[in-house]
Image (cartoon, rainbow, N blue to C red):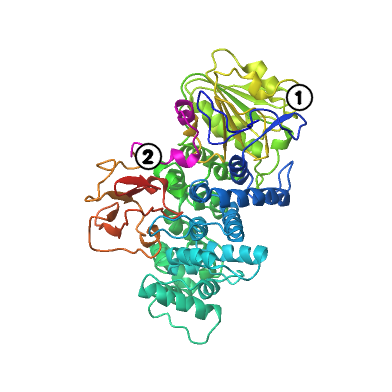
Amino acid sequence: MAKFNKPTPMAASGIQTSTHSDTTTFGGQRGYSHDPRSELFLSAVSSLTDNTFYESESGRLTRQRVLVGDIAVGDPRWMLSFLRWLRDDARIRTASLIIAADAVHARLAAGAADNLAPGERGINRQLIEVVLQRPDEPGEMLAYWHSQYGRTVPKPVKRGVADAVVRLYHQRSLLKYDGTSKGFRFGDVIELTHPKASSPQQGALFRYAIDRRHNRDTIDIGDLPMIVERERLKAQPAELIHRLADQGTLPDILAAAGMTWEAVPSLVDGPWTPQLWESIIPSMGVMALARNLRNFDAAGVSPQMAQLVSEKLSDAAGVERSRILPMRLLSAYRAAPSVRWHAPLEAALQHSLAAIPRLDGHTLILVDRSGSMFYSTSQRSDLTFADTAAVFGTALALRAKRATLVEFGTLSNQVHVPKGGSVLPMLSRFSDLGGTDTARALRGHLRPEHTRVVILTDEQYTGHGADPGAVVPAHVPLHTFNLVGYRQAHAAGSSNRYWYGGLSDASWPLIMLNENSSRGRWPWDAVKPATGEPKSGNPKPDKPTVTVSETVTVLSDSGAHNQYAEPGIGPQTVVGPDTLVWSPSGEGTQPMQIPMPVDAGYRPHDDVPPSTRKWWHLGRNRD
């Protein structure tokens, strides 16, 4: 009997689920298995690499490794799309790196063929390169490979790492990430993978990284002006640093030396003072500001500077550029030493949740508050899966045209949603409700006027009787956001039944896309609009697509450019028919020309704000 491959009259999500119960939940009730791609997706996006209530880290990784091996060999194109989305849009670092390495190992062991397009790089090489988006990650990849598969590194892994090195290694990144605590320093990575420098200056940087790694007596930095400036600044007396802060020039001098605000205490050989903070705050980003609210209060910054911090936290464009996750803002809110920070943090959170749709109709939203949800999302965080469910469930209710918001466990309660309410103050209305009787909550709150149901849960329901999916009428869409990624689903796969994981910006548009679509969608389907329109919030080009004889401009607020090109592609001055034009915003800036082969796809670096995260392809758009 076919379990997954059955025709359905209406839309099915990208995540596919068995049509009949073939397992049990951890609560001992009827469960439904996902197909391998869906199981891997939910597992990877949900719990990172930490223990969860029902599953250990080692158990999850073992389960993932089996899934990764099968999928990487059988469907490498899906794996490549998944990993690109997992690292770029879901912003999950460690899991994407592990999956990429395990996928390549499985493909090499199986002798899997690539079936490449003309001029395309090898699949294994792409799988490695696509997940390396921060300068310390090439070393992380090699360290993982050595720990898991031994010291022999295959050529596709070396080449994928080398591609990333050319894109990521520059003076600023070396100064920030090449610490002595790393097992693989920048010099180690360069010596092992032999990347081809994209410019003479990068070649000089590679030589410097190797000399620095081996502590050689004579190290030439003459062609590396930022490193020269850093050494000069480190030699200055503390009195000069304080004077630069008073003059308001310290941020620019730090930037020229490749240093951030974190270096200030070492430069002055002492603690932060109000004057030092006030010189740095205007140049700090949203994430750094949110992390330092307690430090600002402890140092006693002026009311005027506190107002500037509030304005920066409340700025929608700044929050978008930062790509800060909503749960980090919740952490900052709970740790805030003064109530004066509550309103700007609430504004920042609202901006970070901008991708959540304004659903039409009447939506029933169930937020799982059972005991298993009160497990930490990470060993480095006090936040729980219950917190995540409450934040996103509340935000969805506040934005919906009409919503019924319910918390549930063994019992259930309706949570009042005030018109014009705010997410963070509403979180105090949620409680711990014990078990997971999802069906009972649905029976108690589902009404004929509800046009859809959204459940944020780990799906491990208890209770008795029908599974949750059977309680919801077949014509009513049921959207399940699986927040933890266990193997078992709580409902049968059929029409009008959808699953999601990860709660990234790309997941939320799928609610309406799936209801209006005739086929299943993965989150990366949502970020490639069929009409050629850019993603919501992106600057709209003059034309939705361009032909082979035209060019298109993509705007950015960043002055950095080389990191946005494909490996080995630097800025050019010749505009030709196969050229992408990149132009930073602001007066006095010049367009950058990047040669663009017709069959190439271009991705921005991890630090690019969402408003610039679309590369336009000649003749069609590509991520």
* 443 lies left or right of 552: right
Tag 2: residue type? Answer: Gly
The reply to whether residue 505 is visible in this rendering is: no
Residue located farthest toward the front when viewing the structure as drawn: 1
Between disc 1 and disc 2, whose residue precedes? 1
Pick the front one: 276 or 497 = 497
Pick the front one: 205 or 54 = 54
Tell me, for residue 463, which label it has, or none.
Answer: 1
Label 1 to label 2: alpha-carbon separation: 43 Å
The residue beneath circle 2 is 537
* 255 lies left or right of 91: left
State which mark lies toward you, 1 or 2: 1
Residue located farthest toward the right when viewing the structure as drawn: 28
Label 1 residue SS: loop
Pick the front one: 404 or 616 = 616
Rendered residue at 73%/48% (across/down): 56
Rendered residue at 49%/46% (across/down): 89
From this view, report whether residue 478 is shown above or below residue 568. above
Residue stretch rendered in magenta on the structure: 512-532
Q: x and y percent of residue 127 in the render?
A: 51, 56
State yes or no: residue 513 in magenta.
yes
Disc 1 crowd rating (10 Å Cα; few below 14, some 14-19, many 20+) is some
Q: x and y percent of residue 455 in the render?
A: 60, 28
Tag 1: residue type? Answer: Gly
* 554 lies left or right of 480: left
The reply to whether residue 576 is visible in this rendering is: yes
Pick the front one: 29 or 125 = 125
Quarter of the figure with the N terminus: top right
Q: x and y percent of residue 532 in the render?
A: 33, 39
